[in-house]
Amino acid sequence: MPSLKALKNRIVSVRNTRKITKAMQMVAAAKLRRAQEAAVAARPYAERMNAVIGGLAAAAAGSDAAPRLLRGTGQDRVHLLVVMTSERGLCGGFNSSIVRLARARAAELLMQGKTVKFLTVGKKGREQLKRDHADRFVGHIDLSDVRRVGYANARAVAEDVLARFEAGEFDVATIFFNRFRSVISQEPTAQQVIPAAWEAAGDRGLYDYEPSEEAILADLLPRGIATRLFTALLENAASEQGARMTAMDNATRNAGDMIDRLTIQYNRSRQAAITKELIEIISGAEAL
Amino acid sequence: MAGTMKFDLVSPERRLASAEATEVMIPGADGDMTAMEGHAPVILSLRPGILRVSGPEGTAEYALTGGFAEVTASSATVLAEQAVPRAELTAAFVDSMIAGARETAQGATGAARDAADRLLADLEALRATAA
């Protein structure tokens, strides 16, 4: 039976924890709203980009002159897994769910005798993958100084990936991130970006191309990949805040329950102590 | 009096402008072109330069750093990598881009070198307007 003093300390400590988790939840809610706005604002660009590339890619597909980014290297030997996670913890299963998906994919590819390389974005994923894939890391991109993910960050990641592709370091690149469904639901997603499948947009009519169809496609594909990465980063940012909000909400509720339980225990112990003292006094008086 | 077309200027991060326009002057990679209502559909890539939009609400100018544009008979959509209103264009901003382009130009060879040199020349022209 802990002493009254110890119980009191415990209650105070849990109460402080609850204050912190409550504050974190509110901060996450504010950040979530901003992240969602950013994701919505970025949508028109990504949609147009995908539509135009889709039209061009459908026309170019199958021809030998198609850019390597579209066609692939013709091999399927080396896979690059780009794992995008958060820089901070305390966000529930957010990072674990991405890592779990990436790990399952890596195990599957290794079983098939392929080579797997990891490029990590965000340090939480790196920490989790370090245990069994440390020798497969080829790079890491740190976003811990970035307060708001911008297109420049996505482009930096894209440039890194594209440079490795040009250097022939891998054949297929897949990104792993959490797609934002709602505040309480994020879906870990794997998306192949190189060679990417661009869904052909229906009938887009005839366009002239200036300078030429091939030149524009070659110019657009790297941008398209950067845009996909940007979309993924934004989805991830929104998901992270959503996951953190839910996790902190649960933590706050747990702390509340714990305080209630501890308070009852505290009151009971105090009552027991009082009763005990009274019995001692009364039996002392009776003995006289 | 020419009719109007729908004009959108979109950057990866947000929609910068959306308005009705009578004519849009686009800095295309192969030279400037002006799109008006009824223009033949065209997709063109952009070079760094000034985009000028004239419409019922007056004229607006934006400095772009590349991207592409989609023009149809009734709309002009410009997808710019980076775009700022002309008034907010600062020499320092262009200078930082020129430094980056110079670095690329130095390492590149052949066709990539030509492209980098052209980008550099475009940026320097843009620099002159920003001063």
Image (cartoon, rainbow, N blue to C red):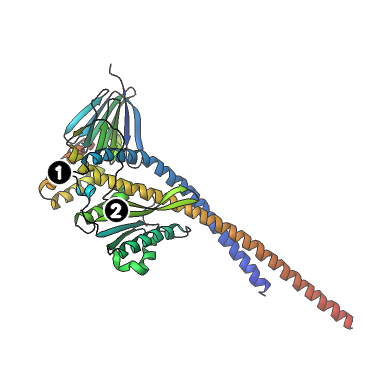
Q: Is residue B92 visible?
A: no
The residue at the point 51 percent across, 56 percent down is A247
Q: Position of residue A84 (x, y in %)?
A: 36, 56
Q: CA distance from mark 1 to mark 2?
A: 23 Å
Judged left or right of residue A138, residue A263 is: right
Kindly check if marks 1 and 2 are in contact, taking CB atoms under 8 A apart as contact. Answer: no
- The residue under label 2 is which amino acid type? Val
State whether residue A129 is above or below residue A2: above
Q: SS at mark 2?
A: helix
Crowding near the residue tagged with mark 1, few <14, some 14–19, many ≥20 C-alpha atoms within 10 Å: some
Q: Position of residue B75 (x, y in %)?
A: 30, 28
Crowding near the residue tagged with mark 2, few <14, some 14–19, many ≥20 C-alpha atoms within 10 Å: many
Which residue is identified by label 2? A157
- The residue under label 1 is which amino acid type? Ala
- For the C terminus of chain B, the quadrant is top left
B58 or A242: nearer the eye? A242
Q: Is residue B11 visible?
A: yes
A151 or A68: nearer the eye? A68
Chain under disc 1:
B
Which residue is identified by label 1? B115
Judged left or right of residue A31, residue A9 is: right
Q: SS at mark 1?
A: helix
B71 or A4: nearer the eye? B71
Q: Position of residue A116 (x, y in %)?
A: 29, 62
The residue at the point 39 percent across, 65 percent down is A128
State whether residue A189 is above or below residue A15: above
